[in-house]
Amino acid sequence: MDSKANPLHPDFRLGVLGGGQLGKMLALAAGNWHLPLYVLDASRDFPAGRVTPFFTEGDFQDFDDVYRFGSRMDVITIEIEHVNTDALRRLEHEGKTIHPAPAQLDIIKDKGAQKLFYREKGIPTAPFQLFEGPDAIVAALRAGRISLPFVQKSRTAGYDGRGVSVIRNEESLGNLLPGACVVEEMVDIDKELAVIVARNASGQVVAYPAVEMAFNPEANLVEFLFCPAAVSPALEREAEALAIRVIEAYGLCGLLAVEMFLDKKGKLLVNEVAPRPHNSGHHTIDSCYTSQFEQHLRAVLDLPLGSTRMKSASVMVNLLGAEGHEGPAIYEGLEQCLAMEGVHLHLYGKSITKPFRKMGHATVVADTTEEAAGRARLVMEALRIVTDR
């Protein structure tokens, strides 16, 4: 069997576009199999550069950098969707295995195309309209084609809460974002859920238990994640089935994080997806039989998918840079957190902290979600990421 057919052959090359914290955790998972992970990103000082020697400095949005890197790989995958898909299409045409495929990435990285895809496939999502910019939105509002309140999302480049603006009244129209966008009707949300689902080229599909997300109201990114979600067994099955339906509609190989709204009437709506390991699956490292990172590797390499069963209840808390601090990162309260039972700290190794920047996460495992949540709040209160400048 040659290297191209055997992912555990010493000469096999799996390339990842992106070397942030997700790339780091993919490399750590690959290390369990002594599988070298080749990474492309701007600087080997990024998190993945500390854990894999196979780091290429370059721009994953640049055609030539992606093409040169990918031409040396047997399989190519991503840890961020905003990559140069023109280069990936050329590599795909030349016979390279790429998961997720560039055509799927082009849909997913454009929130407008994503919404149109759900409409075409009959997948439930919030009612929406597409606009070219703020002037068109205001004109539609004046003409009665849309109504307040609504949510505006930039079609491209949104990430970690950026590119989203909630417009509740006339006064907040000044907060409209520039450029092409999606305008969604405001959903009367009961809970925000996510299901991580995986699929390999052989057609095997598995889903992790649904998680419930609580968002930081200022930064608009996940603050706490609870697993299992506080929903009925019937709704849990419905959420998992919806996530499987979405990944099969895309025909995607790899990992797909499906974020959902549960409205006050008990209806599930797909919000958006991420075709890679995701913040809503970080708890799986410590609380499930197979972490989302190992599962992504299994899926893109067409290996048997691992068990998604929970070993324990868990709560994840994102460790964010403190307000008013930007500069070299200092971690206050580490000793107090490490002394707590069931607390697993994962620091990403970013040298510079900024307000609300994701600097790491902690997963707390316990017999019950309530017990884990109590300790997770203690972690959030104890651990501060600051700078002495």
Image (cartoon, helix red, strand yellow):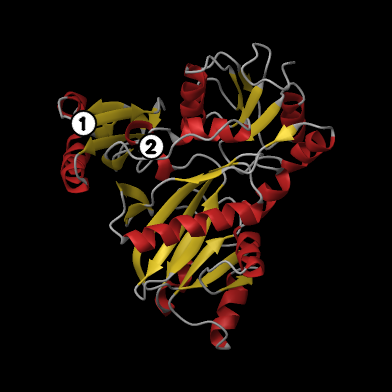
- Measuring 64% from the left and 26% from the top, which residue is drawn there? 15
Residue 189 is drawn in which quadrant? Answer: bottom left
- Quadrant the C terminus occupies: top left
Given residues 233 and 279, the one toward you in this image is 233
Helix, strand or loop at label 1? It is loop
Please tell me which residue lies in front, 327 or 269: 269
**Circles 2 and 1 in contact, beta carbons < 8 Å:** no
Report the amino acid beneath label 1: Gly
Residue 47 visible, this orientation: no
The disc at residue 382 is none
Instruction: Tell me: 247 left or right of 345.
Output: right
Mark closest to the chain's N terminus, 2 or 1: 2
What residue does disc 1 label?
Answer: 342
- 284 vs 146: above or below: above
Q: How many marks?
A: 2
Question: Does 256 sit above or below residue 123?
Answer: above
Residue at 36% from the left image edge and 49% from the top image edge: 222
Rendered image: mark on residue 284? 2
Which residue does the image show at 56% across and 17% down from the upper left? 35
Image side of residue 11 versus residue 162, left or right = right
Identified by mark 2, the residue type is Thr
In front here: 171 or 195? Answer: 195
> Few, some or many C-alpha atoms within 10 Å of disc 2 (few <14, some 14-19, many ≥20)?
many
User: Can residue 198 be seen here?
Assistant: yes
| Coordinates of residue 314 in the picture (x, y in percent) | 27, 41
Q: CA distance from mark 2 to mark 1?
A: 14 Å
Quadrant location of the N terminus in the rendered image: top right
In this picture, residue 3 sits left or right of residue 167: right
| Residue sticking out furthest to the right | 94
Give the secondary structure at mark 2. Answer: helix
